[in-house]
Image (cartoon, rainbow, N blue to C red):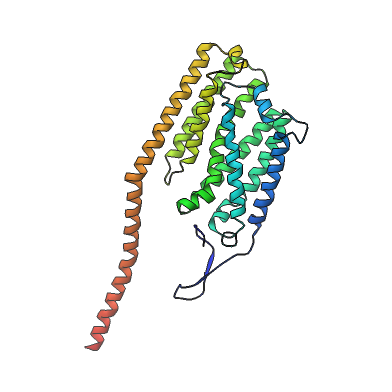
Amino acid sequence: MSDVNNITKSTGNDGAATVVNTSFNRFNILNLLFYIINSIATYSVQFGWVDLPSNGDLSDKYQTIVTPLGTSFLIWSVIFMWQLFWVIWQLLPSQRNSEGVLKAWYFYPIFTVCQAGWTFSFAFEIMWLSLLFMYGILFTLISASMSLQTYKKTWKGYLIWQGPFSIQTGWIMAASVLNTNVLPVFYEATATTRMVVASLSLAVLIITAFTWLSSYPVDFAIPCVILWALGGIYAELNAPLPAIPETFSERQINGVQNAVLAGMVLIGSGIISKALYVLFMQRPAALKAQEASAEDKEEPASASESEEAADSAEESV
């Protein structure tokens, strides 16, 4: 049986038996098809199947002051493997019409189209177009994460359904910051312009993490991934590529690094504080509200039963 709510049909008034809709739907097929398309598009560039520079080569070529350490991008292996599991899981008979699939809607196919568009526009160094595709990925993933946040699920259900989207949403938020900063580098903007763009985009990224932490139920994956990305930026600035000290002064580099560190401390503290607040305040209050709601629903029935009993007593007299 599914960890999340399935589309079911009752076979009787006693509720003892239900039938799960196990037929394939358009989402199942599209999710599988577009995962394959997205994987081929990505690997064809990264593994050199086509004669185009890899993302790593272009990242070094257009190095920004907010480019994370190379090892930070290993998160892509987690994203692709997790999504592969998700794509296979949603094909299981008990999961095909689950609410997790329906809440994911067309978001996965839409975002993979944008990601494939980004892969090739970035590889061909059409940076303004790659930025548009990146924002398209970001908007679609945020929409998917918010949609998947609107139904109740167990921890297992979260890891299966929402986790793959949340991890990539957090990373694409950081990648959007990086892609935004690549644009002034590509067009050879002044160091001052690059510094302003970097400062504003870092501020937006930190604010975004706190915006996500302010929700309930809260999705900790996104701010945690943003924290991971900031850690990569901080580590890279310890020994940046030559293009960075050639463009910025040591004071500017240290200033950005300290700002990133401050952002990491703030977000880390926010994650811990929010976890404690949820554990000791929001979660107990939510459970109490559910219990009160359940009692309210039972009271009218009890009152009705009492009235019926009184009517019966009157009739017997």
Residue lying at 61% horizontally and 36% vertically, measured from the top left: 135
Residue sticking out furthest to the bottom: 316
x and y, in percent, of residue 53 in the image: 73, 29
Q: Is residue 51 above or below residue 81?
A: above
Front-lying residue, 282 or 60 = 60
Percent position of residue 191, x then y: 59, 15
User: Is residue 189 among what the camera can see?
Assistant: yes
- The residue that appears at 46% across and 73% down in the rendered structure is 16
Q: Is residue 39 above or below residue 69?
A: below
At 57% from the left edge and 21% from the top edge, which residue is drawn?
65
Would residue 50 be found to the left or right of residue 263 on screen?
Answer: right
Residue nearest the observer in this picture, 306 or 161 = 161
**The furthest residue to the left:** 317
**What is the x, y in percent for residue 137?**
62, 39
Q: Position of residue 38 (x, y in %)?
A: 68, 43
Please give left or right for residue 135 compared with residue 209 in the image: right
Residue 113 position by quadrant? top right
Q: Is residue 147 visible?
A: no
Q: Quadrant of residue 277?
A: top left
* Residue displayed at 59% across by 34% down: 74
How many numbered badges does the structure rendering display?
0
Q: Quadrant of the C terminus?
A: bottom left
